[in-house]
Image (cartoon, rainbow, N blue to C red):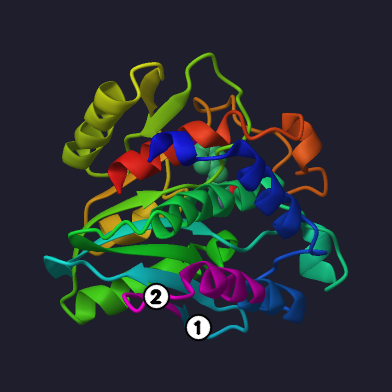
Amino acid sequence: LLPQLQESEITATIGKLASYANRYYKNNVGARASNELADSWRALAAGRSDVTVSQFAHSFVQKSVILEIRGTVAPNEIVVIGGHLDSITPQAMFSPTGKAPGADDDASGIATLQEVMRVLLQTGYQPERTIQFIGYAGEEAGLLGSKAIAKAYATQGRNVVGALQLDMTAYQGSSSDITLISDYTSTAQDDFVAALAAGYLPELSVVRDVCGYACSDHASWTANGYRASFPFEAAFGEDNPHIHTTKDKLVKFDNSAAHAIKFARLALAYA
Ligand code: IPO
Ligand code: ZN
């Protein structure tokens, strides 16, 4: 399946998501971005009775979006591949017309996981375990969407066997390809992810670094007792300097998904 992943698909999806004025979790534009993402995912799921798309409502207007491919052998074992669909800048917090393109943070992660989803669905892939692709709402305001989802799943006793977070995949700021963040993650699953890369993607260089705080939605799964990993675009301090500003646009990574597609390959191997 790996050769079927297309950079052009990832670039197009980033462009689409970055063209909203913003994807702020508390306004109607951000709510619409979630609704239209759900529409796009429903279109990808068309004709598959084992695939469902739902929205997870929160205490704010933007909903999280979940596409589930039901497992054929162990449907109660859930594998999560996620990223956050919201964006933030001071301008967007001030006004619904304020710009927050969030091309790298985190249209890139959503576009990356959506490309994995597209290839799995269009090839008729039927996983043995259930796979959930999740676009989390409200990450920028304190991991709000993922906290609510991970807590609800834990309360319901759902068996999430692992979660992979994709937050910022497009900007190559380091000489290595993938930085596995190693705090607020599962070392055992991080080792598994590194082994997947070594086995399926030997051309990629993988290093490890720490974030220093609960810097993305993986931390919500970890906090609720689940295994989570976070492959990141660069080493600490070498990531995209334009995030959370009106300049977080495609041009800052040369309108290219050359870096992001490495994360799509890794996430496909993980799936
Ligand atoms: C982030 C994640 C890891 C590292 I190292 C540096 C930066 C991004 C995160 N803080 C964010 O803004 N997520 O939305
Ligand atoms: Zn982010």
Residue range of the region highlighted in magenta in the rendering = 36-53
Earlier residue among tags 2 and 1 = 1
**Callout 1: few (<14), some (14-19), or many (20+) C-alpha neighbours within 10 Å?**
some
Please, what is the three-letter code of the amino acid marked with disc 1? His
Q: CA distance from mark 2 to mark 1?
A: 8 Å
Residue at x 76% of width, y 35% of height: 255
Q: Residue at x 24, y 24 (%)?
A: 199
Q: Is residue 153 above or below residue 88?
A: below
User: Which residue corresponds to mark 2?
Assistant: 148
Counting from the top left corner in percent of width and height, residue 112 is at 53, 47
Is there any visible trace of residue 137 in the rendered image?
A: no
Residue 124: say if magenta. no
What numbered label is drawn on residue 58? 1
Q: Is residue 211 left or right of residue 154?
A: right
Comparing 239 with 163, the one in front is 163
Between 60 and 57, the one lying in front of the other is 57
Q: Quadrant of ligand 1?
A: top right
Q: Are marks 2 and 1 in contact (CB under 8 Å)?
A: yes
Dot 2 falls on a residue whose secondary structure is: helix
Query: Considering the image in quadrants, where does the N terminus appear?
Result: top left
Q: Quadrant of residue 81?
A: bottom left
Taking the magenta stretch, the answer to whether it contains residue 39 is: yes
Q: Tell me the crowding category of disc 2: few under 14, some 14 to 19, or many 20 or more residues within 10 angstroms, Cα based.
A: some
Apparent side of residue 111 relative to residue 226 in the rendered image (left or right): right
Say what amino acid the circle numbered 2 marks.
Ala
